[in-house]
Image (cartoon, helix red, strand yellow):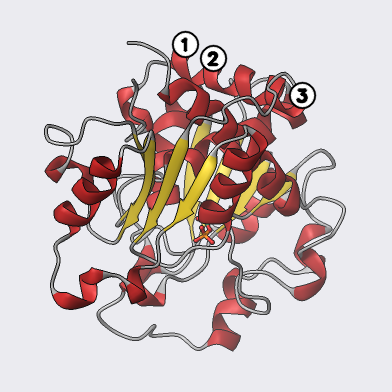
Amino acid sequence: MKHLLRLADLPITEINRILDCAQAAKTGIYDDSETKRIVANLFFEPSTRTQYSFNTAELKLGCKVINFNAASSSLQKGETFYDTVKTFESFGIDAVVIRDRKDRYYLDLIDRIHIPILNGGDGKMDHPTQSLLDLLTIREEFNHFDGLKIAIVGDIAHSRVAHTNIEVMQRLGMQCYISGPEEYQDAQYDSIDFDQAVETMDVIMLLRVQHERHDQAMSISVEHYHQQYGLTMERVAKMKPHAIILHPAPFNRGVEIADDVVECEKSRIFKQINNGVYVRMAVLKRAWESD
Ligand code: CP
């Protein structure tokens, strides 16, 4: 069995193998024969894309699926995170997909849970399947990674998507920059002025301001944010002809992205969401490979 916890744990050969499997899944290589497998999606933090695209991937593979509802579970009676996961393992299921607001929640599990754990996002640290679907979308567009320039724009400091992507994209030879409001930047990364990024990058990845992870309210207004750092059609017109727009979503229209940019010709946002299903099929199949 194979967990999927952090992409930083995987060599580039393994990342490329997962992307190849996801691409093959898109062409229909996998059938729905995993009918004996039961997968539980344990989301302790809200999700639409990750939870339900895992759910879709599980159904496409033929698995039976349990979608855990934290709000109506015995967590409300004081049961712990660990005891909840251990309970699902005790049911005899075949894998768990977990999202939790705690950074590296899986450290409490890996020595004591003996079924594959697929990380659906942990705190501000990692979101491996999001990065894999971002990589698949970029690879489909450009057919390579080496030398591509990406600017990730917005709330970098609170973003597991930014941290996971920058680590793996640098290993793949991409030049990664960050941009956005000063209060949300991270000094360990190279920064670039947003309007300069718009004109020079191959990929602009926008991020939502993650208010739920903030101790204090944003210091600038939504209008000011949109004016300074929002991707508008006026800015899109200045992007390089081949450049594309990514966003992990959910997005806030009129804040980091203008309404008419969401589905503009350069946007690959809904393609990312579609690719998420195939990436998740690939990592589920990988979970049941022997070590
Ligand atoms: N991109 C992403 O993780 O979306 P959800 O929070 O809806 O899963």
Q: Circle 3: is it few (<14), some (14-19), or many (20+) Cα within 10 Å?
A: few
The residue labelled by disc 1 is 13
The residue labelled by disc 2 is 17
Q: Of discs 1 and 3, which sits in the foreground?
A: 3
> How many numbered callouts?
3
Residue 224, by quadrant, is bottom right
Quarter that holds the C terminus: top left
- Determine the CA span between mark 2 and mark 3: 16 Å
Q: Of discs 2 and 3, which sits in the foreground?
A: 3
Marking on residue 28: 3
- Residue type at numbered disc 2: Arg
Q: Position of residue 212 (x, y in %)?
A: 36, 76
In the image, taking residue 29 as reference, residue 247 lies left or right, namely: left
Looking at the picture, does residue 176 appear above or below residue 264? above
Front position in the image: 157 or 13: 13
- Determine the CA span between mark 1 and mark 3: 23 Å
Residue occupying the point 60% across, 70% down: 256
Any part of residue 289 in sight:
yes
- Residue type at numbered disc 3: Gly
Mark 1 vs 3: CB contact within 8 A: no
Q: Is mark 3 within 8 Å of ligand 1?
A: no
Residue 147, by quadrant, is top right
Mark 1 vs 2: CB contact within 8 A: yes
- Determine the CA span between mark 1 and mark 2: 6 Å
Looking at the picture, does residue 285 appear above or below residue 132? above
- Residue type at numbered disc 1: Thr
